[in-house]
Amino acid sequence: MNFLVIDDDMPTVDVILKSIDWDQFGAGHVYSCYNISTAKEYFKNEGIDIAVCDIEMPMGSGLDLLIWARESGYETQFIFLTSHERFDYANTAIRYKASGYVVKPFNREMMEEELRKAILNVRQIATLAQAADQEEWFRSAKTYVEAGFWRELFENQIPADRKAIEEQISIRHLDINAMD
């Protein structure tokens, strides 16, 4: 799992990086940067799963990054760390499916709890994607199995009696009604 910490305040980034035991969260890599344009490069090149991001920064806000990420198709979980409790920030963060919103000063326990939630979200999204892939595979496999059934029936490899046909339909788990 890849993490990215984004804040224009270098000491804040250092505190986050040093305070969290990233290994307990299964971190493959923990990257850091100090502006949105560099963050976008990490997104493009490193496959960021979870971003811990300040909201207000020069040259683009964390909300701008979140909106860009969603519009670009990234499922990255965002945890915002901010000194602002403004409703409009929280509202935008929620609307674009941010995972968490933590108010500064930095609190390790609160951040770890938000990281746990974000990791759960990442895993749920991965599970749903895997299920969708398996469903697609099953559909294509079922189409192939059904085509094989009809080919074998027409080529007389399946006896043309109702019982044999129903048996083959059952064995292949096909949704075909063998009517008279």
Image (spheres, rainbow, N blue to C red):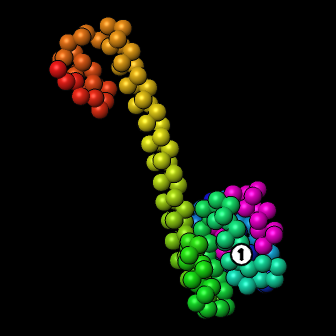
Q: Secondary structure at mark 1?
A: helix
Q: Quadrant of the N terminus?
A: bottom right
The residue positioned 67% from the left and 71% from the top of the image is 67
Residue 164 at x, y percent in the picture: 22, 15
- In-image side of 10 versus 48 (left or right): right
Q: Residue furthest front?
A: 180
The reply, left or right, for residue 94 in relation to residue 73 is: left
Quarter holding residue 12: bottom right
Q: Which segment is the magenta one? A: 36-53
Quadrant of residue 10 within the rendered picture: bottom right
- Asked if one can make out residue 1 in the rendered structure from this viewpoint, the answer is yes
Of the 4 image quadrants, the one containing the C terminus is top left
Residue 21 belongs to the span the image colors magenta: no
Q: Position of residue 44 (x, y in %)?
A: 75, 58
For the residue carrying disc 1, how many other residues have a C-alpha within 10 Å: few (<14), some (14-19), or many (20+)? Answer: some
Per the image, the residue denoted by label 1 is 64
- Residue 27 visible in the shown view: no
Q: Is residue 32 placed above or below 84 in the rendered structure?
A: above
- Residue at 41%, 22% (x, y): give it: 147
Q: Amino acid under label 1?
A: Asp
| 49 magenta-colored | yes
Is residue 34 or residue 96 the one in the foreground? 96
Residue drawn at 43 percent across, 36 percent down: 139
Is residue 77 placed above or below 80 in the rendered structure?
above
